[in-house]
Image (cartoon, rainbow, N blue to C red):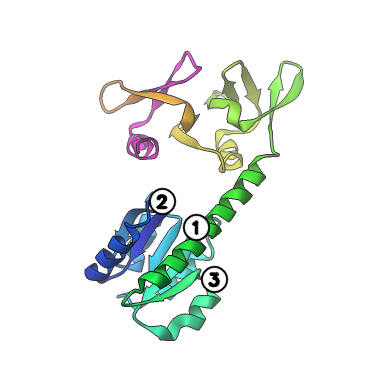
Amino acid sequence: MKVAIIDDEPYSREEMKHLLSTYEWVEVIGEASSAEKAMELLLTDDPQVLFLDIEMPGMSGVELAEALRKMKKRPLIVFATAYPDYALKAFEVEAVDYLLKPFDEEQLARTMERLKKTVAGESAVERESRSHGKLAVQDEDKIIFIEPDAILYIFREERETYICTGKKRYTCRLPIKELEAKLATYPFFRVHKSYLVQLPFVEELIPWGNGVYQLKVSGAKEKIPVSRNYVKELRERLEL
């Protein structure tokens, strides 16, 4: 479970990080000292859960939680605060729980169990939503349907989009941007303006001079170009 801690007090962030370190299935991927910095963190690191203070300079934690309700895929919220007066408001913004400082380990344990079940439930729903849909592609004079899991990479050349599996290359009428949206629940990543790659098939990232790289993909003969703008995020997605 990917977690971020949002609190303007460094000591509180350290305390929460220490408490969360006892849960081996939790990874604290970031922290921020304000709601504004939290928004930046959300865009770059995509945490599943926010441990969120309420009283902070600038935008409050409650205001941030309200803003996040507009997101299509928003993180779960656990308020972690010294103020008991916002519990009703926390309920209104659909927070998972409300922890009071100083943190009680038993209460935190109950919160973590609730989070674990909630995230597991969301993952099951996502798997179910993925299990039925197939992608329509052109194969000579007929349309066939392929499993997204079988796609190694997708690329656009001139006015054609090509879907590449380990067995064959197909054409598709949809542009890359629409395919990226359709495949959002699968581990595809944009490595170039004209290329989408399914990350589990990536084998090597090969330097190609001047900050440019190529990818070697399992089952594909061709090397795939990687724009320098995508290299940092690609490595973060690939590496443990």
In which image quadrant can residue 177 be found? top right
* Three-letter amino acid code of the residue under disc 3: Glu
Image quarter where the C terminus lies is top left
Q: Earlier in the sequence, mark 1 or mark 2?
A: 2
Image side of residue 211 versus residue 27, left or right: left
In which image quadrant can residue 214 be found? top left
Q: Residue, x 46% and y 69% (percent of image)? A: 65
Count neighbours of disc 3 (C-alpha within 10 A) and say few if under 14, some if 14 to 19, many if 20 or more: some
Count neighbours of disc 1 (C-alpha within 10 A) and say few if under 14, some if 14 to 19, many if 20 or more: some
User: Is label 1 in a helix, a strand or a loop?
Assistant: helix
**Distance CA(mark 3)–CA(mark 1):** 16 Å
Q: Within the magenta stretch, is there residue 9? A: no
Q: Which numbered marker is on residue 116?
A: 1
Which residue is farthest front?
106
User: Is label 2 in a helix, a strand or a loop?
Assistant: loop
> Is residue 81 something that shows in the picture?
yes
Q: Earlier in the sequence, mark 2 or mark 3?
A: 2
Q: Residue, x 36% and y 59% (percent of image)? A: 4
Please state the horizontal and vertical placement of residue 84, each as a whole percent of the image. 41, 84
Residue on which the image places disc 2: 25
**Distance CA(mark 1)–CA(mark 2):** 9 Å
* Three-letter amino acid code of the residue under disc 1: Lys
Q: Residue, x 32% and y 55% (percent of image)? A: 30
Which of labels 2 and 3 is toward the front? 2
In which image quadrant can residue 92 be found? bottom right
Magenta stretch in the rendered image:
215-240
